[in-house]
């Protein structure tokens, strides 16, 4: 049993080193008190949010220019999706859900329209939510009780901009 524990500790230290990288790295970036360390294989940037090491493709400075209205969210925030635009299993929907949960919120899925919704509830006008919407302009704005993440094609940057604001990495203007 000690062998298993020993091997487990070694695995944790090795994996920790991989994910944490070299904390003294000259390539590390600071932003608003958060330290971003380059991923060892060049796959993005690692920082700590809610005591969890999180990998981002972009730095806050890369996405801070995305227009964003100030927002605040309660403890239960629906992740609203249009099944014709984003299936509930899409990477974008699952990322938003995971980041909301990392922030300590309940993040159930809900549909914005009834067509093709299956067993998911339909959003009501008084439900607090985060919704992804395709448009030619990347921005974050409030619409009723929802925070809308709007982008064209790749939503990675606007999702990162949202998450950095959600965790206070980028301050609300």
Image (cartoon, rainbow, N blue to C red):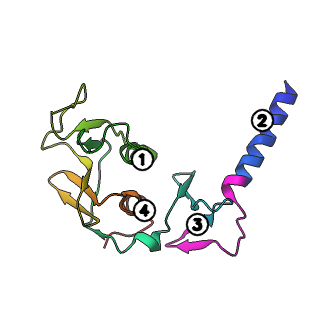
The answer to whether the residue labelled 4 contacts the one labelled 3, judged by CB atoms less than 8 Å apart, is: no
Query: Going from the N terminus, do you reach mark 4 or mark 1 first?
Result: 1
Disc 1: which residue: 95
The percent coordinates of residue 138 (x first, y second) are 29, 65
Q: Secondary structure at mark 3?
A: strand
Quadrant where the image shows the C terminus: bottom left
Q: Is residue 33 left or right of residue 65?
A: right
Disc 4: which residue: 164
Mark 3 or 1: in front is 1
Decide whether residue 35 is among the magenta residues: no
Mark 3 to mark 2 CA distance (whole Å) = 27 Å
Quadrant where the image shows the N terminus: top right
Query: Which span of residues is magenta-colored?
Result: 18-34
Q: Nearer the viewer, residue 145 or 85?
A: 85
The answer to whether the residue labelled 3 contacts the one labelled 2, judged by CB atoms less than 8 Å apart, is: no
Disc 2: which residue: 8
Note whether 38 is above or below 155 in the view shown.
Answer: below
The numbered dot on residue 36 is: 3
Query: Going from the N terminus, do you reach mark 2 or mark 1 first?
Result: 2
The residue drawn where x is 46% and y is 74% is 61
The answer to whether the residue labelled 2 contacts the one labelled 1, judged by CB atoms less than 8 Å apart, is: no
């Amino acid at each position: 049993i000690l062998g298993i524990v020993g091997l487990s500790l070694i695995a944790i230290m090795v994996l920790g080193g991989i994910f944490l990288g070299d904390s003294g790295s000259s390539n590390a970036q600071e932003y608003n008190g958060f330290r971003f360390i380059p991923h060892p294989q060049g796959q993005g940037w690692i920082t700590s949010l809610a005591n969890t090491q999180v990998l981002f493709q972009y730095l806050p400075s890369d996405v801070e220019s995305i227009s964003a209205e100030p927002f605040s969210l309660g403890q239960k925030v629906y992740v609203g999706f249009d099944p014709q635009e984003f299936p509930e299993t899409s990477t974008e929907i699952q990322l938003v859900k995971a980041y909301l949960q990392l922030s300590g919120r309940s993040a159930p899925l809900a549909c914005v329209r009834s067509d093709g919704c299956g067993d998911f509830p339909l959003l009501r006008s008084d439900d607090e939510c985060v919704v992804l919407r395709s448009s030619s302009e990347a921005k974050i704005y409030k619409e009723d009780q929802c925070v809308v993440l709007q982008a064209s094609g790749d939503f990675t940057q606007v999702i990162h901009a949202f998450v950095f604001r959600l965790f206070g990495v980028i301050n609300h203007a």
